[in-house]
Image (cartoon, rainbow, N blue to C red):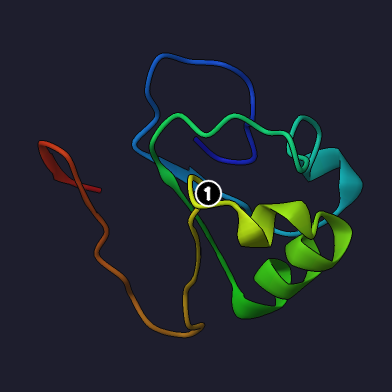
Amino acid sequence: AVDYWGHKDFIGAYFLTHAHSDHLVGLNGEWESRGGAIYCSPVTRALLFRKHPALETRADVVVVALSLGRPHVITLQGGEL
């Protein structure tokens, strides 16, 4: 899911493109993770934790900072993305 924080049964991965408020609607300290990590840039990760510090300490929320300027392979249950 890209910039989507609504409810689905299972989403394998979440991508946060940037930390503008219109892209964070539904993502807050009480957001219910459905099993997938959140992938974003290092700057976006820092801004996300600054806006919602509770996310940084929650064991059920994984936020992965992807380095810029290079491709990444993200393995999901049942295959690759």
Q: Which residue is drawn at 73% across and 34% down?
A: 30
Residue 51, by quadrant, is: bottom right
Give the number of marks: 1
Q: Give the residue type at disc 1.
A: Val
Q: Which residue is drawn at 56% across and 40% down?
A: 2
Callout 1 secondary element: loop
In the image, residue 53 lies at what x, y percent?
Answer: 79, 60
Residue 44, by quadrant, is: bottom right
Identify which residue, 28 or 69, lies in the foreground. Answer: 28
Q: In this view, does 44 lie above or below 62?
A: below
Query: On the picture, is 35 further left or further right than 46?
Result: left
User: In this figure, which residue is indicated by the disc labeled 1?
Assistant: 61
Identify which residue, 15 or 69, lies in the foreground. Answer: 15
Query: On the picture, is 67 further left or further right than 12?
Result: right
Identify which residue, 81 or 38, lies in the foreground. Answer: 38
Q: In this view, does 46 lie above or below 58?
A: below
In the image, residue 71 lies at what x, y percent?
Answer: 33, 75
In the image, residue 52 lies at what x, y percent?
Answer: 81, 54
In the image, residue 62 lies at what x, y percent?
Answer: 48, 56
Q: Is residue 3 above or below residue 68?
A: above
Number of other residues with Cα within 10 Å of mark 1, as a class: few under 14, some 14 to 19, many 20 or more: some
Q: Which residue is drawn at 68% across and 53% down?
A: 55
Identify which residue, 14 or 70, lies in the foreground. Answer: 14
